[in-house]
Image (cartoon, rainbow, N blue to C red):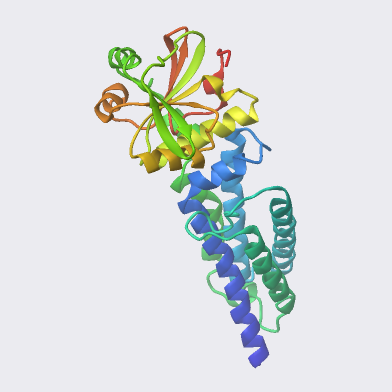
């Protein structure tokens, strides 16, 4: 009987781990989406869908294990998922240099190796709870309807709590605005930034060149969504074979903040320009980040963090 109780505790623990992992991914969904997108398997729209389906799957498996719903199926599915995750992590460990596998989102960082060890332990635990003498909840619980509601909620929650960016675009489809007067005036005021030996050198001679198609990102180095937005932009360009040569980051912030921003967003190939805070606020009307496409100095597209995707580059020759 003690062994049966230990098995039950272990089953609750594994099911709870899946639920916690899903919740932590959901809390930092933007980071998780960008991490998934970095593998260049789907476009960004499908990436946002896949990310939420994965979170929903973890929630469902966790609940099925805890409530012993279709237990044989739940056990096999959980084992298969753990094996697939482990194979994926082995690939990441060999071919990439990721410090966080995002198995528990951004809040709890685990390296691929640490997560592989965790998965091996979980797989061992799954074999221990493959069979149980205690009756299935299906025949003993009076709350069958409640469990079904929880499963349905587990599928819906990732799409309701954190709607996909495409849903955001449909709801808030109003045209993005900037102060074009302030923007054009600022083009003559921004100062080129060169990066030498992990330091910033200001080049007051170079002027912003408006010829051709260009992307301008107006950001603050201390803004979380500026970092995520520019990182998303950087990955979109990489995944779509777009050169970073015509990407210009108008940024303000501390020296260390700008250096960290450039490294974290993987934009070493982009041009950086220093902009004064009040100028950035005047241009963007206080909305950061703001992305602008210039075509021969004419503003042809404006986007923000939520609605930037591959369509942002349409009709440009970047």
Q: Is residue 111 left or right of residue 105?
A: right
The number of callouts visible is 0
Q: Position of residue 78 (x, y in %)?
A: 69, 63
Q: Determine the residue located farthest toward the front in the rendered image.
A: 197
Relative to 66, does residue 279 appear above or below in the rendering? above
Residue under the image location 62 percent in, 30 percent down: 238
Where on the picture, by quarter, is residue 269? top right
Q: Residue at x 52, y 33 (%)?
A: 267
Rendering coords of residue 253 (x, y %): 33, 37
Choose between 296 and 129: the one closer to the eye.
Answer: 296
Q: For residue 180, what is the image quadrant?
A: top left
| Residue 202 placement: quadrant | top left
Q: Nearer the viewer, residue 280 or 191?
A: 191
Q: Which residue occupies 36% across, 22% down?
A: 191
29 to 226, vertically: above or below: below
Give residue 209's position: percent from left, percent from top.
45, 12
The answer to whether residue 289 shows anywhere in this view is yes
State whether residue 87 is above or below residue 310: below
Q: Quadrant of the C terminus?
A: top right
Residue in view at x 27 percent, y 24 percent: 279
Q: Quadrant of the N terminus?
A: bottom right
In this rendering, position of residue 311 left or right of residue 307? right
């Amino acid at each position: 009987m003690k062994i049966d109780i230990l098995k039950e505790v272990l089953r609750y623990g594994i099911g709870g781990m899946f639920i916690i992992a899903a919740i932590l991914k959901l809390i930092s969904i933007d980071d998780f989406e960008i991490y998934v997108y970095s593998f260049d398997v789907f476009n960004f729209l499908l990436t946002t869908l896949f990310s939420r389906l994965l979170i929903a799957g973890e929630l469902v498996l966790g609940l099925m294990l805890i409530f012993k719903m279709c237990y044989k199926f739940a056990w096999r599915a959980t084992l298969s998922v753990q094996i697939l995750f482990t194979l994926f992590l082995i690939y990441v460990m060999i071919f990439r240099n990721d410090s966080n596998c995002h198995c528990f989102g951004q809040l709890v960082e685990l390296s691929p190796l640490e997560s592989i060890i965790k998965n091996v332990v979980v797989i061992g635990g799954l074999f221990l709870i493959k069979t149980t003498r205690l009756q299935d909840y299906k025949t003993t619980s009076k709350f069958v309807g409640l469990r079904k509601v929880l499963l349905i909620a587990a599928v819906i929650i990732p799409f309701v709590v954190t709607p996909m960016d495409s849903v955001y675009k449909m709801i808030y489809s109003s045209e993005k605005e900037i102060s074009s007067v302030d923007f054009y005036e600022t083009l003559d005021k921004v100062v080129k930034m060169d990066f030498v030996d992990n330091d910033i050198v200001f080049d007051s001679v170079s002027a912003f060149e408006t010829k051709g198609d260009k992307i301008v990102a107006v950001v603050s180095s201390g803004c979380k969504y500026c970092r995520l937005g520019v990182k998303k932009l950087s990955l979109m360009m990489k995944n779509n074979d777009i050169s970073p040569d015509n990407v210009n980051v108008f940024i303000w912030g501390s020296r260390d903040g700008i250096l960290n921003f450039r490294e974290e967003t993987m934009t070493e190939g982009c041009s950086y320009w220093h902009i004064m805070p009040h100028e950035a606020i005047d241009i963007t009307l206080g909305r950061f980040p703001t992305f602008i496409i210039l075509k021969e100095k004419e503003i042809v597209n404006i986007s923000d963090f939520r609605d930037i995707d591959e369509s942002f580059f349409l009709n440009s020759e970047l």
